Image (cartoon, helix red, strand yellow):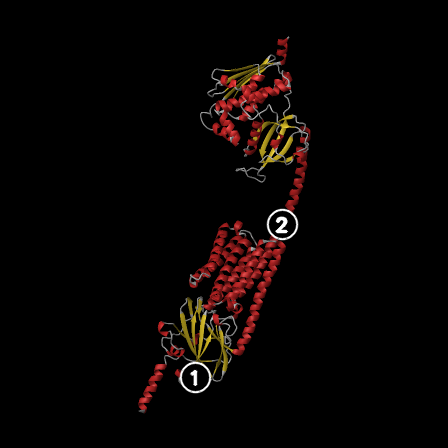
Amino acid sequence: MQLKQLALVSFWFLYLAPLLAQPLTVPESANGFKLLDWIEFKPETPDMVGKSPRDIYMSDGWKKPEGELDFGFTTNAYWFRLSLRTTASRRIVLMADAAISRLLLYKLNREGASLDWAASTVESHDLSLNARGNPDVIRHRRPAAELELPPGDTRILLRMQNEQLSRMPLILWDARIFNEFRTGETLVFGLFFGAVGAIALYNFLMFLSTRETPYGVYVIYALMAICYSAAFQGFHIVLMPWVGEYWLVRSVAVFVCLFGAAMNWFARSFLKTRSHAPAMDRIHIGLALLAAFAAAASVMPFLQLASTLYIIAGLAILSVIAMLVSGWIVWRRGFKPARFYVLAIALFTLGASANSLRIWGVIPHHFWIQHGVQLGIVVEMILLSLALSDRINTLKKSLEKNLREIALAHELISTSEKKYRVLVEDTSDLIFSIDLSGRILSMNHASRRLLGHSPDDLKGKSIFSLLHEAVRESQGYDLMRLRDAVQQIGNSVLQTRVRFSSKTGEPVSLALRLERIGAGERGEGIADGLILAKATLDEDDVLAACVTAEHGSYTIENYLNLSDLVHQRITRSLARYFDRDSCDEITLVLREMLMNAIEHGNLEITYAEKTEAQRDGTYMQLIRDRQKVEPYKSRRVIVEFSLNQRRVWFRISDEGHGFDHEAMRAGEEQRMRSLQESHGRGIALARALFDVVKYNEKGNSVILAKLTGARLHSLTE
């Protein structure tokens, strides 16, 4: 019987041996003691659901970790067990060095001196995010519970489930040492957030005083760094437990994304990548937009956070690489403040990389390595502040140089202004500027002598309002020609003849020259929309008194400006034999007849077409369209003239189809009385003025003749 009992006991111990983890004797000074080597784990399986913690602890399938207990981004649940041994009662703190969404801790206590764990009691502690306000949970940024360990062995069982990076680096603290650690940690992080906050405040004040955009962007960058660090270290769990598990978990990803977007935004602003490195500028814009999109995606309930976290990790790596590359490129291209920027980003990357290697177990744990990200951020902020100061110094030197150049330019401008006054104000020509609508912007003092108006009286008025309103002239045509010249000037220089009205109402004949100022290849320039005009008094030809006889012939294309030049050329000597009024009348009629030869003859524009186009404001465009196509394009107008002491004689011929001049003559009196139209009166005016008006049979050639004053006097005698 005794042998049988001994065999059963032996079998029982042999059965339990593989199930029981080797207990850890709690060291006398537990100062952040890592429990990785004494932890066993296994994933949760369906058969474990509903079982008691004692049964799960005693079940099989437990494994020792190989390296860090890092399960990546997964929502699967994992169980962990360990056994602690003390020789006397001890108060300890168990802390998970990670923000875990759901974490349950079970402590198995044996009653009295019993060796039977099957009869042990279970003490549970909910360390999940939703239960952080429970009285048995220590108020800390990481899940932590204070436990009373009786003498002997104590078994600990934990169940972990997390939406973020699932790892279980469990740490053991003596309760008294943990309180000292928490105080020191609070001081360290207080210094960190205070330093970054002070840097942000300083740069905010600099932004208010300088209005430099990089300072404002840097303030946002610093604030995002504070939010990112606070969330990454779990301080948001302590400060805002009331927002619930969902937002506590997802806010970390949101702040990481916003920090990444701010990093790229600051890189663009500080380095001026838009001008210094356009390709990198587009990359930073893309990364910033992707980071903002990832921040929005992180809070979407229908998207798994694990998938988003992989994207965020990739964006973070790409952003750091892009910032380093941009800084290097801009530095090599001569922007000296970029050297501080490159060093700052490099040190931040070094701190973050060291912390990642610590987590992965590549390098040993150390306080400064554990907080490498925070240390890197502080150093980065200090260096970036130096970079901004260096940038301001660079801008200050550039500003001083620009001020010297401005002073020199001001001196040159003063000299140019004096020359301008001599060349413009002291000239007898009318010089003024207008915009594309014809509004007068400036006028020299020649306006007093030529028009009787002061420059201030004419400034702001329309140049079209200065046209002389003689009833016998085709005022609508003059207005249309001048308005079209202003609107169609482009890059060319236009010259025309105008009649302005003086203050007393008298006509003043002027040769007008219009030129666009500052126009580039596409008509755009520093003074785009400005037209400089010069008007010269149309004085009588001094040789006109010497003319005894004159004759000539001209062949012109279908351009109205050519007709103006021709009729001015062939009438310049009329003053030898005619008075001023007769000269004006002859000039007017010739102008009308030349226009008829071009418009109605060669271009075949009918009276109705012209009336409708003038009403719609498209007449000049109609002429330009006809000038470009055949058969109108190749047609010409021939002008012949002869002047002597007896008479003046003109013949105007076009290559059109002609017209029925006899039928036209029947309606002349009605057109002469009509003041509603600005055209259609040329023939009637010609018959009223000239002694001879004779058309050929086809109607495309007319002879105009008028006796001189001396000849008429001899005939009347």
Give left or right: position of 446 versus 363.
Answer: right
Position of the C terminus, as image quadrant, is top right
Q: Give amino acid for label 1.
A: Arg
Q: Name the residue carrying label 2.
A: 399
At 64% from the left and 11% from the top, the residue drawn is 713
In this rendering, is residue 605 above or below 709? below
- Is label 2 in a helix, a strand or a loop? helix
- Image position of 311 with respect to 471: above or below: below
Left or right: 29 as drawn, with respect to 307: right
Quarter of the image holding residue 445? top right
The outermost residue toward the bottom is: 1
Q: Which mark is residue 422?
A: none
Q: Nearer the viewer, residue 497 or 619?
A: 619
- Mark 2 crowd level (few <14, some 14–19, many ≥20, 10 Å Cα): some
Where does label 1 land, which residue? 110
The image quadrant where one finds the N terminus is: bottom left
Q: Secondary structure at mark 1?
A: loop
Query: What's the amino acid at mark 2?
Result: Leu
* In front of the other: 240 or 555: 240
Number of the front mark, 2 or 1: 1
Residue 336 in percent (x, y) is at: 57, 54
Total of numbered circles in the picture?
2
